[in-house]
Image (spheres, helix red, strand yellow):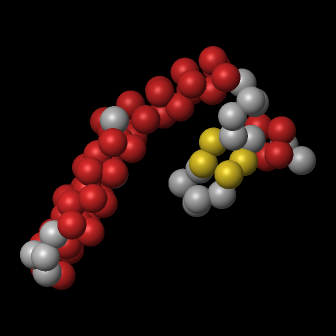
Amino acid sequence: MKTFALGALVGYVFGTRAGRARYEQIVRTYRKFADHPAVQGAAGVVRAKVGAKVGERVPFVHGNGHRTSEAAASR
């Protein structure tokens, strides 16, 4: 859901001609939403469930933007 919302937001931002002020408003709203403790908790639960299902077959992209897997992180 977070990825979909981000994609919709990016599409709107690139498709609009509302100007910088509207862009800044959208970015603030997204960050406020993404940083909300309930959203962070839900994302953590989803991340844990997906990790349990796929194991190390699919690397995760962490908050810093670097792709890592459990095996690579433990080296």
Left or right of 57? Residue 39 is: left
Residue that appears at 89% across and 47% down: 75
* Residue ID at (63%, 26%): 51
Percent position of residue 13, x then y: 23, 66
Left or right of 35 in this view: 49: right
Q: As drawn, is 40 to the left or to the right of 63?
A: left
Image spot of residue 4 (x, y percent): 33, 42
Residue 25 lies, with reference to residue 69, above or below; the image says below
Q: Quadrant of the N terminus?
A: top left
Number of numbered labels in the structure image = 0
User: Can residue 65 be seen in the rendering of this structure?
Assistant: yes
Left or right of 60? Residue 37 is left
Give the vertical position of 66 relative to 37 (above or below): below
Q: Which of 47 and 3 is in front in this view?
A: 3
Q: Determine the image quadrant of residue 24.
A: bottom left
Q: Between residues 55 and 15, which one lies in front from this camera angle?
A: 15
- From the top left corner, tell me how far across and down residue 50 is, in percent: 57, 25
* Figure check: 54 above or below 21: above
View extreme (front): residue:
15
Q: Tell me what residue is drawn at x 21 percent, y 60 percent.
A: 12
As drawn, which residue projects farthest toward the right? Answer: 75
Q: Outermost residue, top direction?
A: 53
Q: Give the residue displayed 72% in from the left and 24% down from the top.
A: 55
Res 28 seen here: no
Q: Where is residue 15 in the image (x, y as percent from the top left)?
A: 21, 66
